[in-house]
Image (cartoon, helix red, strand yellow):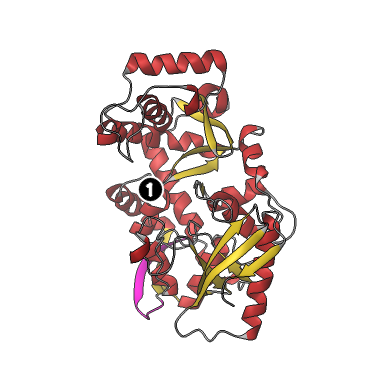
């Protein structure tokens, strides 16, 4: 018999799975947080704080920006690679990423913009320098862009470094002001993880199961999009082979429609134990894992969201970098804020309330409190509203 899960319960499960139910206070366990989420997306844009720092701070506001690099560079508890985008993942997941290295290496060879990279001799020369000199960033090399200079073009050494990073030959050693330093993989990844190379079938099984575990319920498309490391036909074959281990469920969407999905065998226990989300108001990052899958986001919350930093200013509906506002289990608004670190201010550019949300004085107080906390997170004292 198919288990039906109401929209409210589905939201509760999803927010709990993303560590957004509890109040973001208390002792910080960074390793546990990243493992629970599965990955944390990296992004270079720093309007307030870069995406990876903001995502971790949203889960526990005792987090501070230098902690993640120490977690990687000093303790070797995470590694960098691609999920749907550049991310940090728990180091113990490394053996399950072997097929990802292989597939990305094959894909990069076909990318038009990578055709200008160095050949095998040039790549070996780069690795020889890294072996002799230690971790190096792209600034340590001086090859030039070949042909007409265009925005998307990169010098051959940069393309070669990226190619070897995608393929797993090089790994990120550490970052300095977000500049990536490449090192030989055998000097970054612990030996026990390098020796452990599971079969392709075992990797697919782990990737699909780990995705479903972290989502609590999912369609085949949800599972595929979680890591973006398995293909849809592979997920479909996996669900058929493992069908006896799942519970068939129907999830009520925000619009009232019902969607068939799969859930782990302990779904009823998860439903019983998942807490109601805190009423605290949270400002989420545009790359937060809870909202990254826009199809799932709209299905569960009826919330349509698009990042517009690459949209020409005249065509933007909202703004360059707009943050969703979550209160309890619903999205109540969007806010555009920018940090001026030199002036010591966090500037509120604009605020939009979601349709059908009646903005109250209590919500205004909650938002002010969260903005104050966000300002303190980046070492700023003053919040300035452009138009209160």
Q: In this rendering, is residue 176 above or below 365?
A: above
Secondary structure of the residue carrying tag 1 is: loop
Query: Is residue 269 visible in this depiction of the protein?
Result: no
Across and down, in percent, residue 201 comes to 37, 39
Nearer-the-camera pick, 48 or 303: 48
The image quarter in which residue 387 lies: bottom right
Identify the residue shown where x is 45% and y is 29%. 197
Question: Overall secondary structure of the magenta stretch?
Answer: strand
Across and down, in percent, residue 237 comes to 30, 49
Describe residue 258's horizontal placement relative to residue 265 as left or right. left
Identify the residue shown where x is 55% and y is 50%. 50
Q: In this rendering, is residue 129 above or below 227?
A: above
Identify the residue shown where x is 63% and y is 43%. 68
Across and down, in percent, residue 263 comes to 44, 62
Looking at this view, name the residue that lies furthest to the right: 27
Tell whether position 256 is magenta. yes
Quadrant location of the C terminus in the rendered image: bottom right
Tell whether position 148 is magenta. no
Nearer-the-camera pick, 369 or 234: 369
Looking at this view, name the residue that lies furthest to the front: 343
Q: Residues within 10 Å of mark 1 (few under 14, many from 20)?
A: some
Q: In this rendering, is residue 360 above or below 366?
A: below
Q: Tally the marks.
A: 1
Describe residue 365's horizontal placement relative to residue 302 as left or right. right
Which residues lie in the magenta part?
254-264
Quadrant location of the N terminus in the rendered image: bottom left
Disc 1 marks which residue? 228
Across and down, in percent, residue 348 comes to 58, 68
Q: In this rendering, is residue 387 above or below 93?
A: below
């Amino acid at each position: 018999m198919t288990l039906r899960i109401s929209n409210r319960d589905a939201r509760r499960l999803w927010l709990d799975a993303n560590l957004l139910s509890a109040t973001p206070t208390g002792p910080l366990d960074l390793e546990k947080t990243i493992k629970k989420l599965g990955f944390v997306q990296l992004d270079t844009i720093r309007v307030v704080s870069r995406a990876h720092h903001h995502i971790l701070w949203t889960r526990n506001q005792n987090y501070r920006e230098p902690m993640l690099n120490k977690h990687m560079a000093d303790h070797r508890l995470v590694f960098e690679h691609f999920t749907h985008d550049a991310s940090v993942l728990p180091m113990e997941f490394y053996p399950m990423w072997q097929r990802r290295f292989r597939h990305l290496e094959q894909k990069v060879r076909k990318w038009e913009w990578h055709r200008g990279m160095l050949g095998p001799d040039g790549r070996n020369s780069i690795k020889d320098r890294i072996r002799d000199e230690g971790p190096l960033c792209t600034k340590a090399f001086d090859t030039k862009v070949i042909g007409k200079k265009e925005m998307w073009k990169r010098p051959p050494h940069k393309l070669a470094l990226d190619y070897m990073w995608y393929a797993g030959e090089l790994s990120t050693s550490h970052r300095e002001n977000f500049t990536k330093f490449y090192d030989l993989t055998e000097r970054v990844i612990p030996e026990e993880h390098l020796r452990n190379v599971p079969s392709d079938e075992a990797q697919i099984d782990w990737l699909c199961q780990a995705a479903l575990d972290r989502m609590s319920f999912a369609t085949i498309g949800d599972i595929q999009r979680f890591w973006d490391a398995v293909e849809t036909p592979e997920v479909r074959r996996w669900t058929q082979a493992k069908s006896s281990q799942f519970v068939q469920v129907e999830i009520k969407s925000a619009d009232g429609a019902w969607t068939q999905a799969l859930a782990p065998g302990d779904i009823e226990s998860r439903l019983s134990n998942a807490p109601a989300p805190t009423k605290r108001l949270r400002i989420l990052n545009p790359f937060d894992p809870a909202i990254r899958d826009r199809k799932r986001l709209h299905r569960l919350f009826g919330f349509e969201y698009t990042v517009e930093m690459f949209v020409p200013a005249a065509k933007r509906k909202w703004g360059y970098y707009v943050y969703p506002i979550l209160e309890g289990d619903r999205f109540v608004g969007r806010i555009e804020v920018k940090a001026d670190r030199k002036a010591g201010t966090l500037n509120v550019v604009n605020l939009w309330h979601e349709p059908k949300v009646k903005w109250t004085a209590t919500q205004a107080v909650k938002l002010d409190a969260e903005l104050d906390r966000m300002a303190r997170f980046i070492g700023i004292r003053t919040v300035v509203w452009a138009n209160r």
